[in-house]
């Protein structure tokens, strides 16, 4: 963004180590997991890992849009809850309802994102507060809708996306549908962010909204779109989580912070202007790999929390030092 | 309201100043109207109003500290887990023994001091975004805490329960404590060099540094005050529950609620503008909203929905006219 005009040779030298460190961390973690548990190198091992990580990866990629645009989206966890609770009620155990229920959920998601964006852009409420309010509200809505105790279950058709493995394939033997969804959505989000004008405008408004505005970027419209993308990704993550988590009113709890953590691990800069979709997805995989590793080490839940906190701080601190070092 | 301001720009500044009071008046009016409308006039006494306030003392104490953090353009998400940690720590140290009250209080404040110092150092020296730094700290504290305790731990002697339950008539000690704390905070912010440094650093860090203010120290100081306040809220909750519970902070959502209260009180998240009285108004508004819901008989889930909407609406109430770009 603030590209410096360095002498040619110097510039090339500096561009060499530009591979995002998250990939190295992820690779190291995977090696560590394989060393500790060779079964992980089998297709069932890593495919199940990818399947479990897929919802968070999609969520992180969506969250990245809002982070790069300079905001936060705390409402994604409650969107997940609403999707899981809402679809179990709407589908009413009828397998034929799957498609229109999913369509309805995406419509609700788009509406949530639209409201978030409108509140931030036109009521000028900081996104932290606006999406916090949305989170509280949607959690309340999920409670109201289900009457406090969600009943029913999701149909197998609905669970298809999160749960089913395509088996008997050559070479990799099994392929979770969740992974296909992750690849398709991940590529779509990558393309939208890094290959289109919308993506460039999102970067621009996150880096310097005033400059972007003067350069003719429709700041409000772009910001609203970023919130809508984030909410839609939360719906997708919710549908996949519905595949392997039960129906309850706290399915989504904590996912907003995990998504932000994943994006930050992927080198996204809070308050905007910098971030990469593949790196955010790698960040989500890294976070899951850390949890898996801690699990193999037999560490209890509290230690996982401590490690997550330490890693979060360390990741940002390292990124800041690097940024200072390269002068960008 | 808005058209008045559009024609007379001089009023705009004053509106900013009086917006929290205006919101408070609206909330009070709503409370009175609902009480009259539902015929529950027995709730319209001063005693009852005090008891309404009494329900949000922990939030109030935390919010006083959070005001410092937000004014200096930082934020503290670690208060909730710190509150849990302190409440457990004090009640374990006291363990029913009146002689251990003072050491326990000292330990609690020391813990607050250390957490605030570490938060401040991570934010200023490592230049980690405050949101991430304190979120990480929150996870670390909560993790350490749950590694040791998973249920009520220790017990608080009756001598210390006085803090939460004792008082002059209907005016409890804790409410007086909160009022004194607010006055002290007001004094620090208005009449000390540290206070004006906080506004300077929060308003424009680079300008403050150029003006010769040691910005890192100010930020660290604000975080120490914030964590000390959270520690005091933890002490209060230990005294109120008569024992320490490792979930008390996260159950009360003191991190996000204290931020919401501060912002409703007119302190802007970008830092440098706002004050302690706005925060106090925010705390009262929050407890009034709860009481209004109770009077009106709104069911628990609808209550939550309305709460979310009201938080956003209250912030929008003054943010909507600001010219700055927000994200």
Image (cartoon, rainbow, N blue to C red):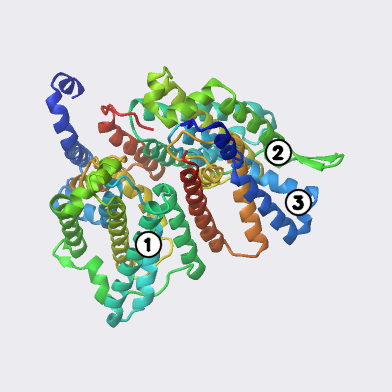
Subunit under mark 1: B
* Dots 3 and 2 on the same chain: yes
- Could you say which disc has been placed on residue B115 in the image? 1
| Distance Cα–Cα, label 3 vs label 2 | 14 Å
| Distance Cα–Cα, label 1 vs label 2 | 41 Å
Image x and y of residue B195, in percent: 19, 51
Label 2: which secondary element: helix
- Look at 16% across and 36% down and name the residue there: B18
| Displayed quadrant of residue A196 | top right
Image x and y of residue A249, in percent: 52, 46
Please indicate whether residue B167 sits to the left or right of residue A64 in the image: left
Q: In this view, does A157 lie above or below B88?
A: above
State the residue in front, A80 or A129: A129
Label 3: which secondary element: helix
| Distance Cα–Cα, label 1 vs label 3 | 40 Å
Subunit under mark 3: A
- Look at 64% across and 48% down and name the residue there: A24
Subunit under mark 2: A
Q: In which quarter of the image is the N terminus of chain B?
A: top left
State the residue in front, A51 or B72: B72
Q: In this view, does A107 lie above or below B70?
A: above
Residue hosting label 2: A179
* Dots 1 and 3 on the same chain: no
- Could you say which disc has been placed on residue A57 in the image? none
Q: In which quarter of the image is the C terminus of chain B?
A: top left
Residue hosting label 3: A45
Please indicate whether residue B216 sits to the left or right of residue A149 in the image: left
For the image, the number of numbered tags is: 3
Lower position in the chain sequence, tag 3 or tag 2: 3
Residue B294 in sight in this render = no
């Amino acid at each position: 963004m603030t590209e410096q005009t360095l002498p040619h040779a110097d510039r090339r030298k500096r561009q060499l180590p530009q591979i995002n460190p998250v990939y190295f961390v992820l690779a190291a973690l995977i090696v560590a997991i394989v060393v500790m548990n060779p079964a992980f190198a089998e297709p069932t091992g890593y495919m199940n890992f990818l399947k479990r990580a897929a919802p968070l990866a999609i969520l992180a990629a969506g969250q990245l849009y809002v982070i790069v645009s300079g905001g936060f989206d705390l409402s994604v966890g409650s969107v997940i809850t609403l999707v899981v609770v809402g679809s179990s009620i709407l589908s009413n155990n009828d397998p034929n309802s799957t498609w229109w229920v999913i369509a309805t959920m995406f419509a609700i998601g788009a509406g949530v994102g639209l409201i978030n964006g409108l509140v931030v852009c036109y009521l000028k409420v900081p996104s932290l507060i606006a999406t916090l309010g949305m989170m509280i509200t949607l959690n309340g809505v999920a409670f109201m809708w289900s009457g406090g105790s969600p009943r029913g279950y999701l149909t197998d058709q609905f669970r298809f996306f999160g749960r089913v493995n395509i088996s008997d394939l050559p070479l990799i033997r099994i392929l979770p549908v969740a992974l296909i969804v992750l690849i398709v959505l991940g590529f779509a989000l990558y393309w939208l962010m890094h290959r289109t004008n919308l993506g460039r405008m999102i970067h621009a408004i996150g880096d310097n909204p005033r400059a972007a505005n003067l350069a003719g970027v429709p700041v409000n419209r772009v910001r609203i779109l970023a919130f809508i993308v984030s909410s839609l990704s939360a719906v997708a993550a919710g549908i996949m989580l519905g595949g392997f988590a039960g129906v309850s009113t706290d399915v989504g709890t904590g996912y907003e912070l995990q998504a932000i953590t994943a994006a930050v691990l992927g080198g996204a800069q809070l308050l905007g202007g910098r971030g990469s979709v593949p790196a955010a997805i790698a960040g989500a995989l890294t976070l899951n790999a850390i949890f898996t590793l801690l699990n193999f080490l037999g560490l209890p839940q509290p230690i996982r929390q401590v490690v997550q906190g330490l890693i979060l701080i360390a990741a940002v601190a390292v990124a800041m030092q690097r940024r200072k070092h390269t002068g960008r | 309201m808005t058209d008045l301001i559009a024609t007379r720009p001089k009023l705009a500044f004053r509106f900013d100043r009086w917006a929290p009071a205006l919101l408070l008046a609206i909330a009070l009016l709503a409370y009175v109207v609902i009480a009259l409308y539902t015929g529950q006039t027995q709730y319209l006494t001063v005693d009852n109003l005090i008891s309404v306030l009494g329900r949000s003392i922990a939030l109030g104490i935390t919010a006083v500290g959070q005001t410092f953090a937000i004014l200096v353009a930082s934020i503290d998400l670690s208060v909730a887990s710190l509150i849990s940690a302190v409440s457990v720590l004090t009640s374990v140290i006291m363990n029913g023994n009146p002689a251990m009250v003072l050491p326990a209080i000292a330990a609690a404040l020391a813990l607050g001091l250390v957490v605030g110092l570490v938060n401040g150092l991570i934010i200023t020296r490592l230049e980690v975004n405050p949101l991430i730094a304190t979120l990480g700290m929150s996870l670390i504290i909560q993790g350490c805490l749950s590694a040791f305790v998973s249920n009520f731990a220790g017990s608080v002697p009756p001598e210390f329960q006085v803090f939460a339950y004792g008082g002059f008539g209907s005016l409890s000690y804790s409410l007086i404590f909160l009022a004194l704390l607010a006055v002290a905070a007001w004094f620090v912010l208005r009449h000390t060099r540290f206070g004006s440094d906080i506004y300077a650093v929060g308003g424009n860090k680079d300008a403050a540094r150029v003006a010769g203010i040691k910005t890192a120290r100010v930020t660290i100081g604000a975080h120490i005050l914030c964590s000390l306040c959270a520690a005091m809220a933890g002490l209060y909750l230990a005294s109120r529950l008569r024992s320490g519970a490792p979930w008390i902070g996260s159950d009360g959502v003191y991190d996000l609620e204290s931020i919401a209260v501060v912002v409703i009180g007119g302190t802007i998240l970008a830092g440098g503008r706002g004050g302690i009285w706005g925060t106090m108004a925010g705390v009262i508004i929050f407890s009034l909203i709860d009481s209004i819901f109770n009077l009106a008989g709104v069911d628990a889930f609808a209550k939550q929905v309305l709460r979310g909407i009201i938080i956003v609406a209250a912030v929008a109430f003054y943010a909507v006219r600001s010219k700055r770009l927000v994200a």
